[in-house]
Image (cartoon, helix red, strand yellow):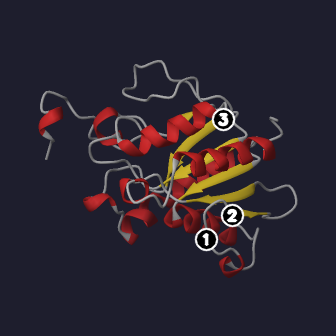
C-alpha cells in the first residue's frame, strides 16, 4: 500500500537491479529493496532513510558523486563501488523469507563471480553477511562460516586473492534511530574500505 506522501507516484514495483560501477573495487551487499524506497524509485537504497545514511557515507568517503539519492534521474554516480542485495524484490515487512533468499541467491553468486576487480565486500547487516559467507563456503573459499562472527566494522581475510569482508550494521531506521548506528560509524566503515581498496 502506498504512503500518502507518495500517492501520486507510479511505483517501480519490479525487481530492483544492482547499481554502480561494473569495474568497482568495492562491492556493497544490502538486504532487499525498501517498500517505499527502492521499490518505489527503482534504484538501490534510493528514496528512503536507509539510503540517506548510506549515500552520505559513500559521498564523504569518495565512493559517490553526491550525498543525496532521491530518484533514478538525480544524477548520482558511484565511483569504484557497486551496490547489490540478497533479495531484489521488496519483501513483506522488509524482511526476506528464507525462500526469497534462496530464489535470489543465484543472482548474487553470479555478481560475485563477474565482479573481477572487487577487493573489498561490505555486507550491510547479518543477513547479507551470512549470504556472502554462504557463497564463499559453497565455492570452497572458506571451510566454515563459524570462523566469521558478524559485528560492526569487523574485517576478515577470506583467502589469498579473495576480497576482504567487512561487516556493518544495516542503516535501517531501527538501527539509526536508536543510535546503534551513527553517521560517524558508517563513515568509518567506508573510509576503511577505501583504504583496503588501495584508494588512499
What is the x, y in percent for residue 153?
A: 66, 59
Question: Is 120 placed above or below 148 here?
Answer: above
- Marks 1 and 2 sit apart, C-alpha to C-alpha, by 7 Å
What is the x, y in percent for residue 166?
A: 68, 58
User: Residue 150 got which mark?
Assistant: 1
Q: Looking at the rendering, which quadrant does residue 10 occupy?
A: top left
User: Residue 61 got which mark?
Assistant: 3
Query: Which circle's residue, 3 or 2, is located before the other in the chain?
Result: 3
Labels 1 & 2 near each other (Cβ < 8 A): yes
Q: Looking at the rendering, which quadrant does residue 161 occupy?
A: bottom right
What is the x, y in percent for residue 86?
A: 48, 57
Question: Is 52 placed above or below 9 here?
Answer: below
Which residue is the extreme one toward the right? 160
Q: Is residue 115 visible?
A: no
In the rendered view, does 26 fall on the left or right side of 180? right
In the rendered view, does 136 fall on the left or right side of 50? right
- Marks 1 and 3 sit apart, C-alpha to C-alpha, by 23 Å
Mark 3, secondary structure of its residue: loop
Name the residue at 34% across, 63% down: 95
Name the residue at 37% across, 53% down: 173
User: Residue 154 got which mark?
Assistant: 2
What is the x, y in percent for residue 144?
A: 70, 80
Query: Which circle's residue, 1 or 3, is located before the other in the chain?
Result: 3
Mark 2, secondary structure of its residue: loop
- Marks 3 and 2 sit apart, C-alpha to C-alpha, by 18 Å
Name the residue at 23% across, 34% down: 11
Mark 1, secondary structure of its residue: loop
| Residue placed most toward the observer, 111 or 149 | 149
Q: Is residue 148 visible?
A: yes
Amino acid at each position: 500500500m502506498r504512503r500518502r506522501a507518495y500517492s501520486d507516484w507510479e511505483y517501480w514495483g519490479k525487481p530492483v537491479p544492482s547499481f554502480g560501477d561494473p569495474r568497482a573495487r568495492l562491492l556493497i551487499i544490502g538486504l532487499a529493496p525498501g517498500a517505499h524506497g527502492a521499490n518505489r524509485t527503482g534504484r538501490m537504497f534510493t528514496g528512503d532513510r536507509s539510503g540517506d545514511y548510506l549515500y552520505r557515507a559513500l559521498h564523504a568517503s569518495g565512493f559517490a558523486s553526491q550525498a543525496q539519492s532521491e530518484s533514478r534521474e538525480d544524477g548520482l554516480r558511484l565511483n569504484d563501488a557497486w551496490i547489490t542485495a540478497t533479495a531484489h524484490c521488496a519483501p513483506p515487512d522488509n524482511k526476506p523469507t528464507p525462500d526469497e533468499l534462496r530464489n535470489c541467491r543465484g543472482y548474487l553468486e553470479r555478481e560475485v563471480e563477474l565482479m573481477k576487480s572487487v577487493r573489498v565486500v561490505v555486507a550491510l547487516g547479518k543477513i547479507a553477511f551470512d549470504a556472502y559467507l554462504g557463497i564463499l563456503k559453497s565455492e570452497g573459499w572458506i571451510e566454515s562460516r563459524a570462523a566469521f562472527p558478524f559485528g560492526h566494522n569487523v574485517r576478515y581475510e577470506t583467502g589469498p586473492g579473495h576480497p576482504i569482508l567487512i561487516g556493518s550494521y544495516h542503516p535501517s531506521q531501527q538501527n539509526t534511530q536508536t543510535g546503534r548506528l551513527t553517521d560517524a560509524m558508517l563513515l568509518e566503515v567506508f573510509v576503511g574500505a577505501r583504504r583496503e581498496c588501495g584508494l588512499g
